[in-house]
Amino acid sequence: MAEAQIDPAALQALQDYAASRCRQSGAILKRGQARGQVRADIDPALLIELFSSLAWNRLLTSRLDVSQNEIEQIVSAVVEGEAVRK
């Protein structure tokens, strides 16, 4: 990742890897949309980017141990939203 900041070839390799992973994960979300399990107005690529951002942040800051409670909070925030319902 650091090399991609200064080397165009490394940047291209990182972009290609990320795009491939997003396509694969996005296909899962699109199937969920087709079944009516995922909101149709959600862009799968943006949702995957959100999850990827969390994963990369944890990796780059050596915080790979995630508790069950943290996982539940993350899933709840994404699935149910973070706004208080009145």
Image: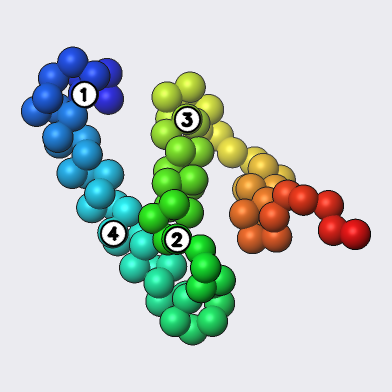
Q: Amino acid at mark 2?
A: Asp
Q: Position of residue 70 (x, y in %)?
A: 67, 43
Q: Residue at x 14, y 35 (%)?
A: 12
Question: Label 2's element?
Answer: loop
Label 2 neighbour load within 10 Å: few <14, some 14-19, many 20+: few
Is 4 positioned to the left or the right of 24 in the image? left
Q: Position of residue 71 (x, y in %)?
A: 63, 48
The answer to whether residue 5 is visible is yes
Q: Which disc, if any, is residue 23?
A: 4
The residue positioned farthest toward the right in the image shown: 86
Is 35 positioned to the left or the right of 11 in the image? right
Question: Label 1's element?
Answer: helix
Q: CA distance from mark 1 to mark 4?
A: 21 Å
Q: Amino acid at mark 3?
A: Asn
Q: Position of residue 41 (x, y in %)?
A: 52, 68
Sequence-earlier tag: 1 or 3: 1
Q: CA distance from mark 4 to mark 2?
A: 12 Å
Q: Which disc, if any, is residue 4?
A: 1
Q: Amino acid at mark 1?
A: Ala
Q: Residue at x 90, y 59 (%)?
A: 86
Sequence-earlier tag: 1 or 4: 1
> Mark 3 highlights which residue?
57
Q: Residue at x 45, y 61 (%)?
A: 43
Q: Amino acid at mark 4?
A: Arg
Q: Which disc, if any, is residue 43?
A: 2
Sequence-earlier tag: 3 or 2: 2
Residue 18 position (above or below residue 64): below
Q: Position of residue 48 (x, y in %)?
A: 43, 52
Q: Residue at x 49, y 45 (%)?
A: 50
